[in-house]
Image: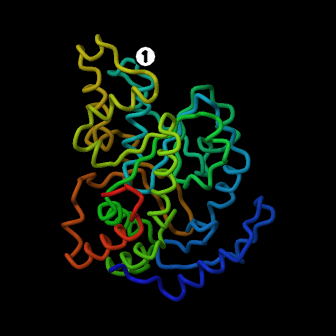
Amino acid sequence: MAQAPSESSKSDTKSSADETPPESYSDLVISTLPRRGGWAKPLVLYRNYWLNPGRLEHIIPVKERFKPRRDDIILATYPKCGTTWLKALAFTVTTRGRHALAGHPLLAGRHPHLEVPTPAGDLDGIERMPSPRLLATHLPLSLLPPVVAASGCRVVYLCRQPKDAFVSWWHFANQMRRKGSPPIKLDDALSMYCEGFSPFGPFWEHHLEYWKEKSARPEQVLFLKYEEIASDPVEVVRTLAGFFAVPFTEEEERRGVPEEVVRLCSFEMLSGLEHNKGGDVARGDSIVVGRSMFFRKGKVGDWENHMAKEMAEKLDDVVEDKLKGSGLVF
């Protein structure tokens, strides 16, 4: 059975439930939010999700000020579930009519993340982007503005087998830790993950928000699993093209365009690009996030190389319990 939340986790959750969430960042005193360490950086509990406190000043304006357009495409993912791959596939599919695949700007381009504090991810910069916009986020649906549903924009959500997502995050978190700090032990990381304590966690709540929205708005919300892309990427590319209302023509099918999109966006191609081999995404507090850190293996089932049977069963029990009755299975 799943491990019961720790006493600190219970008190943290209770504190959050008892507080009325602020409506704007000016009303928020981060020091009053439940805080907990254990990962590369401490996290705070805000509206039932564990978040990097330094990101709140960028996350809260998204809910308050982001204005989705009807022709927007929002790519929502839980961390370490194939974000880079999905962005590459979506961008290539939607822009194939404007760019020859051989010299596609994907080979040198980057795409804005709603909550990332960079010039490319600044909300004012996003507002100035021409339509149609392709936007990415790790935010749960409840931290996006309600008008997202009313706007009619399309949302693609990507998740991953929790055991693989966990192992990938554990590796990433250890790469992000401060210089001189001890590595995060796998069993400690698993206990935190199973409690729902991880960046943008609990992971099951993150998944379920979009899963329920997919049921309510199937024409505007597409729910994908990383394993589906890995097992049949060409078919998923066709699904994306249809969902984006730019299906492949018979001529494109004859020319093998779906297969060429898959080749251009393959793990080997993306990880081999010069701008993904070097350079940093962010720096601060003795932590450096290099672009190459977003590419590890991308293999389905890699968890078996790291987790003992008992550990895998522990996480499986949590998943079964938390998703029970939802129809979402892994």
Could you tell me which quadrant the N terminus lies in?
A: bottom left
Quadrant the C terminus occupies:
bottom left
For the residue pair 153 and 287, the one nearer the viewer reads as 153
User: Considering depth in this image, is 174 or 162 the residue closer to the camera?
Assistant: 162
Q: Considering depth in this image, is 69 or 96 the residue closer to the camera?
A: 69
Q: How many marks?
A: 1
User: What colouring does the structure picture have?
Assistant: rainbow
Quarter of image, res 175: bottom left
Residue 274 to residue 284: above or below: above
Name of the residue lying farthest toward the front: 325
Residue lying at the far bottom of the rendered structure: 7
Q: Amino acid at mark 1?
A: Gly
Q: Quadrant of residue 257?
A: top left
- The residue located at (46%, 58%) in the rendering is 289
Mark 1 nearby-residue class (10 Å; few <14, some 14–19, many ≥20): few
Q: Residue at x 32, y 76 (%)?
A: 186
Asked which secondary structure carries label 1, the reply is loop
Pinpoint residue 28: horizontal percent, then vertical percent. Answer: 76, 67
Q: Residue at x 49, y 47 (%)?
A: 76
Identify residue for label 1. 97
Residue at the extreme right of the image, as rendered: 26
What residue is shown at x 25% (from left), y 72% (from top)?
312
Q: Position of residue 49 (x, y in %)?
A: 57, 66
Is residue 115 found left or right of 194 in the rendered image?
Answer: right
The image position of residue 79, as x and y in percent, is 44, 57
Q: Is residue 76 above or below residue 48?
A: above
